[in-house]
Image (spheres, rainbow, N blue to C red):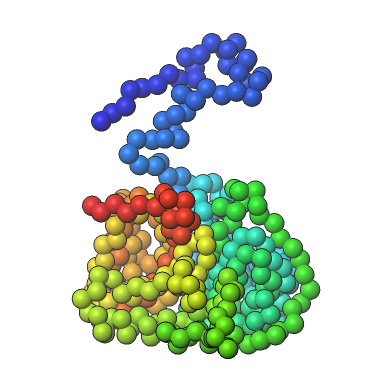
């Protein structure tokens, strides 16, 4: 059903508009349809893909052009043109950046209000120290650096290391709650305390006491996540999607509070229809290749390629191979939307 057309700003006499402006007043009706469009939102987020082989040389060039002390974090931001590149947003709530650390470099300790995760893309020998815990960085690992926790990055290997940063920075910035605190190098107090959580079904409980940490597990090694996906595919061949969620192993809740993370295995030759959800979704290919089809957009993603699809859009994923699985990392803002009561799924 079409809605009646509302009065435009130009319909009002200029002296009246000036009188409103002078009092910091704005008439609602000329903008009402823009902020409350009928049926579904009009997203600024555009379906956009970033090809790794194209951006990689530009990121390595940044390593030549800008020394670490002039960058603090050497990152090329994957910016969505729908929001304007200068806004540095992949979607309304998600920031994506490809970060480069060269052998011997150190990205100094800091902590900030936005939550971050790292999805390791390339290289060996780097580590992130989070809250005193040294987390190795290997291809496909997910490392959390949640709100308020000290973190720094070091590199003991001999080749460049690159990872994908996923932050809720646009959301926290929008709330005017985004800031950073600089610190000095952390003392490493433990080496992957979260390893104790990597056997499903048991959690540390010394003297019957359970951890009350908001983030008990910081590193989710890809080798374990991949094995979980393969086991799921083998033992439950009838399952709709071979997908696992990254969670807080103490509570079963999402690993972070604003953005959610999951990993998907597309079986050989598989075509997977995902319903339209209210949250925008980021896809990053860890292994193999996949096509992402979303309304008028279609992207053929290879390894380490990334794309973002706006919310309220049905998405079809197609494994590019008839013989090999494809593994895809996903991020969205469903945890935030669920907390706010605006999350919805629309089946076609
Ligand atoms: Fe940071």
At 40% from the left edge and 41% from the top edge, which residue is drawn?
42
Nearer to us in this view, 17 or 132? 132
Q: Is residue 170 shown above or below 30?
A: below
Counting the numbered discs, the total is 0
- Residue 231: give x, y in percent of width and height: 32, 85
Q: Is residue 38 visible?
A: yes
At 77% from the left edge and 70% from the top edge, which residue is drawn?
183
- Residue 313: give x, y in percent of width and height: 33, 52
Q: Is residue 190 left or right of residue 333?
A: right
Q: Residue furthest left?
A: 238
Q: Is residue 306 visible?
A: no
Nearer to us in this view, 109 or 103? 109
At 66% from the left edge and 19% from the top edge, which residue is drawn?
22
Q: Is residue 302 shown above or below 87?
A: below
- Residue 18: give x, y in percent of width and height: 62, 16
Nearer to us in this view, 231 or 309? 231
Q: Residue furthest right?
A: 184
Looking at the rendered image, the quarter that the N terminus falls into is top left
Q: Is residue 331 left or right of residue 114?
A: left
At 76% from the left edge and 77% from the top edge, which residue is drawn?
185
Residue 59, quarter of picture: bottom right
Q: Is residue 156 shown above or below 65?
A: below
Residue 71, quarter of picture: bottom right
Q: Is residue 153 shown above or below 177?
A: below
Nearer to us in this view, 176 or 58? 176
- Residue 113: give x, y in percent of width and height: 65, 60
């Amino acid at each position: 059903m079409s809605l009646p057309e509302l009065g435009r700003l130009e319909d009002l006499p200029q002296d009246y508009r000036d009188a409103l402006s002078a009092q910091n007043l704005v008439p609602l009706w000329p903008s009402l349809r823009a902020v409350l469009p009928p049926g579904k939102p009009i997203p600024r987020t555009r379906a956009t893909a970033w090809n790794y082989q194209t951006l990689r040389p530009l990121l390595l060039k940044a390593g030549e052009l800008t020394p670490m002390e002039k960058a603090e974090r050497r990152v090329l931001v994957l910016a969505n043109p729908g929001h304007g590149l200068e806004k540095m947003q992949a979607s309304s709530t998600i920031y994506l950046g490809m970060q480069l650390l060269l052998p011997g470099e150190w990205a100094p300790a800091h902590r900030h209000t936005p939550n971050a995760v790292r999805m390791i893309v390339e290289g060996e020998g780097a580590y992130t120290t989070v809250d005193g815990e040294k987390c190795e960085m290997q291809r496909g690992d997910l490392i959390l650096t949640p709100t308020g926790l000290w973190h720094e990055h070091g590199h003991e290997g001999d080749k460049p290391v690159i990872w994908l940063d996923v932050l809720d920075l646009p959301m926290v910035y929008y709330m005017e709650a985004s800031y950073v605190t600089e610190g000095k190098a952390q003392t490493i107090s433990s080496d992957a305390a979260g390893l104790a959580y990597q056997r499903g079904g048991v959690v540390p409980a010394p003297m019957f006491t359970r951890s009350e940490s908001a983030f008990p597990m910081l590193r989710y090694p890809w080798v374990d996540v991949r094995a979980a996906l393969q086991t799921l595919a083998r033992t439950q061949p009838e399952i709709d999607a071979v997908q696992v969620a990254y969670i807080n192993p103490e509570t079963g809740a999402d690993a972070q509070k604003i953005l959610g993370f999951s990993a998907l295995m597309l079986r050989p030759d598989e075509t997977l229809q995902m319903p339209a959800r209210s949250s925008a979704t980021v896809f990053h290919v860890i292994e193999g290749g996949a096509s992402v089809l979303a309304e008028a957009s279609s992207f053929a993603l290879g390894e380490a390629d990334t794309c973002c699809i706006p919310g309220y859009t049905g998405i079809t994923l197609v494994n590019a191979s008839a013989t090999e699985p494809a593994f895809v990392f996903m991020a969205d803002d469903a945890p935030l939307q669920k907390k706010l009561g605006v999350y919805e799924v629309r089946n076609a």
